Image (cartoon, helix red, strand yellow):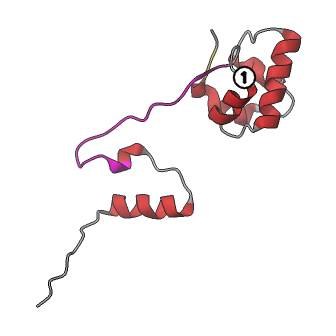
């Protein structure tokens, strides 16, 4: 007589699997054990030192073209004095700034 192996999946696990199949980001807390929370770290990038490839890889909504515009702006006008100055770069608006605020640092 054959026995079936059953797998118990929680609703959070099923949601995470479904979201991954659809290409959505899944918070790492979904994979934590019950009663346990994990904190995902956000990669930060120095707006005044990073090259275009690093900016494009780190910032949401910023591809290589916009990243090159950020580097060109920095080369033309000098280091960014504030994170908000990023909106002076053509193609970078308030929405992109807010989406990436926690990823940006100035050193």
Point out the image quarter for the N terminus.
bottom left
**Which residue is pictured at 29% across the width and 62% down the height?**
10
Q: Residue 31: say if magenta.
A: yes
SS majority, magenta: loop
Residue position for label 1: 51
Task: Specify the quadrant of the image occupied by residue 107.
Answer: top right
* Residue drawn at x 59%, y 27% as measured from the top left: 103
Which image quarter: residue 71? top right
Residue 3 in picture, x, y percent from top left: 14, 83
Q: Taking 81 as reference, is 43 left or right?
A: left
Q: Nearer the viewer, residue 99 or 59?
A: 59
Most extreme residue toward the front is: 1
Compared across the picture, whether 85 is left or right of 26 comes to right
Q: Position of residue 32 (x, y in %)?
A: 30, 46
Label 1, residues with CA under 10 Å away: few <14, some 14-19, many ≥20: some
- Residue in the picture at 53% in, 28% down: 43
Residue 40 picture location, percent across and down: 42, 35
Query: What range is drawn magenta here?
Result: 30-46
């Amino acid at each position: 007589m054959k026995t079936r192996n059953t797998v118990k999946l929680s609703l959070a696990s099923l949601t995470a699997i479904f979201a991954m199949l659809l290409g959505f980001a899944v918070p790492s807390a979904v994979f934590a054990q019950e009663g346990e929370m994990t904190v995902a770290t956000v990669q930060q990038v120095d707006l005044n030192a990073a090259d275009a490839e690093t900016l494009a890889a780190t910032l949401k909504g910023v591809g290589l073209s916009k990243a090159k515009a950020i580097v060109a702006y920095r080369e033309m006008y000098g280091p960014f004095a504030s994170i908000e100055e990023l909106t002076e770069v053509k193609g970078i608006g308030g929405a992109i700034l807010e989406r990436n605020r926690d990823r940006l640092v100035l050193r």
